[in-house]
Image: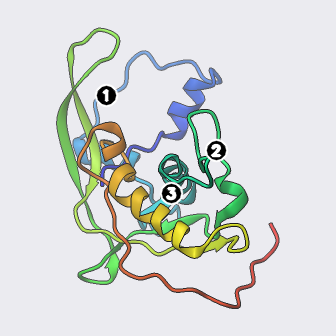
Amino acid sequence: MLQNRLTDEQLLQIGKFKAKEKFTAPKEPREQAEAKAYLTQDDKKPYVPAESLMACLIEAGKFIRLDKKRQMSTAKGTLLPGFLSVEEFYLPLIDPKTNKSAAWEVDMRAGRNPNGGEAVCIVRPRYDSWSFTFTALLDTEQLDEKVYRNLVDIAGSNMGLGDFRPQRKGIYGRFKVTSWKRLESYSSAAQ
């Protein structure tokens, strides 16, 4: 998986809250990649934001038909948040081989500037071995559990997570379900 988090500085620039600096010294590739990784603030452990997983599931909803007239998601909207919610805010990335935090490497590749077409170097963190666990609250009165499982399978194979994923004509970010457990009694704190 390739990650490409917008830094706080980039977000401020987009919102025009801060003037763009005229010159900054080029950073080393590892420094550039680390700035784009989703890492916890306190212990710098990698994660996937729940919003990213939810966006992935919403896009996969375009392949799920609810009845003869409705799809779970369309280009203009989605019904998914009414049926499913991811209960965590972030999903820690774990290396399935070591059962510890997933390690990342610097990924450098050529890209094209969309404005001028010139070649640019794109530097991002790349996770070669990763997994995550999440808890979802499902409305099984509205949809059968098999529909949700199908949704997650489609999301992992057709949509993916991160940059250069299948949804964006890429090869990274695919995932598959290795364990699916139904928790009969689950209580969630009100948010």
Whole-number angstrom distance, CA of label 1 to CA of label 2: 56 Å
Q: Earlier in the sequence, mark 1 or mark 2?
A: 1
Q: Which residue is mark 1?
A: 25
Which x, y percent locates residue 109? Answer: 17, 36
Element type at marker 2?
A: loop
Q: Is residue 78 above or below residue 147?
A: above
Residue at the spot 69% in from the left edge and 62% down from the top edge: 83
> Marks 2 and 1: in contact by CB < 8 Å?
no
Q: Which residue is mark 2?
A: 69
> Marks 1 and 3: in contact by CB < 8 Å?
no
- 140 relative position to 40: left or right: right
Q: Which amino acid does the dot numbered 2 rest on?
A: Lys
Classify the position of the C terminus by image quarter: bottom right
Whole-number angstrom distance, CA of label 3 to CA of label 1: 35 Å
Q: Is residue 156 above or below residue 124?
A: below
Q: Earlier in the sequence, mark 2 or mark 3?
A: 3
Q: Is residue 159 above or below residue 75?
A: below
Element type at marker 1?
A: loop
* Residue 113 numbered mark, or none: none
Which x, y percent locates residue 117? Answer: 25, 12
For residue 14, what is the image quadrant? Answer: top right
Residue at the spot 28% in from the left edge and 38% down from the top edge: 169
Q: Residue furthest front?
A: 68
Q: Which residue is mark 3?
A: 53
Q: Which amino acid does the dot numbered 1 rest on?
A: Ala
Q: Residues within 10 Å of mark 3 (few under 14, many from 20)?
A: many
Quick one: 170 or 99, which is closer to the camera?
A: 170
